[in-house]
């Protein structure tokens, strides 16, 4: 297994491209680009480019959704700030 290989974590089906490999004692840890997590290399199997493409697209969709939510939160905070500047008044 080398950096750039496409692999699948057999326990959950997570597919990703190998970004980093590190040795710690007798365990080799592999960082996947899609999850940004390290996996024990003994739990990974080779995967196809088709499997990776689908996983990368899902990760991109999730990141875009999170960015949309963050933008909406910021907009709501700005609206709340503006509304707090309005003083109540009424006609008597």
Image: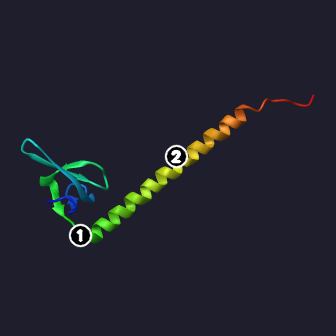
Q: Residue furthest left?
A: 26
Q: Residue furthest right?
A: 92
What residue sits 43% from the left and 59% below the top? 61
Query: Would you say 12 lies left or right of 61 here?
Result: left
User: Dividing the image into 4 quarters, which one contains the N terminus?
Assistant: bottom left
Dot 2: within a 10 Å radius of its alpha carbon, few (fewer than 14), some, or many (20 or more) residues?
few
Query: Would you say 22 lies left or right of 32 here?
Result: left
Q: Residue 44 at what x, y percent from top left?
A: 17, 57
- Label placed on residue 70: 2
Q: Quadrant of residue 89?
A: top right
At mark 2, the secondary structure is: helix
Q: Residue 65 at what x, y percent from top left?
A: 48, 54
Query: Would you say 69 lies left or right of 35 here?
Result: right
**Among the two numbered marks 1 and 2 on one chain, the one whose residue lies closer to the N terminus:** 1
Which colour style is shown? rainbow
Q: Residue 55 at what x, y percent from top left?
A: 33, 62
Decide which of 20, 44 is in the foreground and name it. Answer: 20
CA–CA distance in space, label 1 to label 2? 33 Å
- Label placed on residue 72: none
Dot 1: within a 10 Å radius of its alpha carbon, few (fewer than 14), some, or many (20 or more) residues?
few
Label 1, on which residue? 48
What residue sits 55% from the left and 48% below the top? 71
What residue sits 66% from the left and 37% below the top? 80
User: Dividing the image into 4 quarters, which one contains the C terminus?
Assistant: top right
Q: Does 86 appear above or below 19?
A: above
Decide which of 26, 58 is in the foreground and name it. Answer: 26
What residue sits 29% from the left and 55% below the top? 33
Q: Quadrant of residue 91?
A: top right
């Amino acid at each position: 297994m080398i950096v750039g290989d496409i692999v699948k974590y057999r326990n959950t089906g997570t597919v990703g491209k190998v970004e980093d490999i590190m040795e710690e004692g007798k365990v080799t840890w592999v960082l996947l680009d899609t999850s940004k997590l390290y996996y024990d290399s003994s739990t990974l199997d080779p995967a196809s480019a088709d499997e990776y493409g689908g996983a990368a697209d899902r990760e991109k969709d999730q990141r875009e959704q999170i960015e949309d939510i963050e933008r909406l939160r910021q907009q709501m905070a700005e609206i709340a700030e503006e509304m707090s500047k309005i003083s109540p008044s009424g006609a008597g």
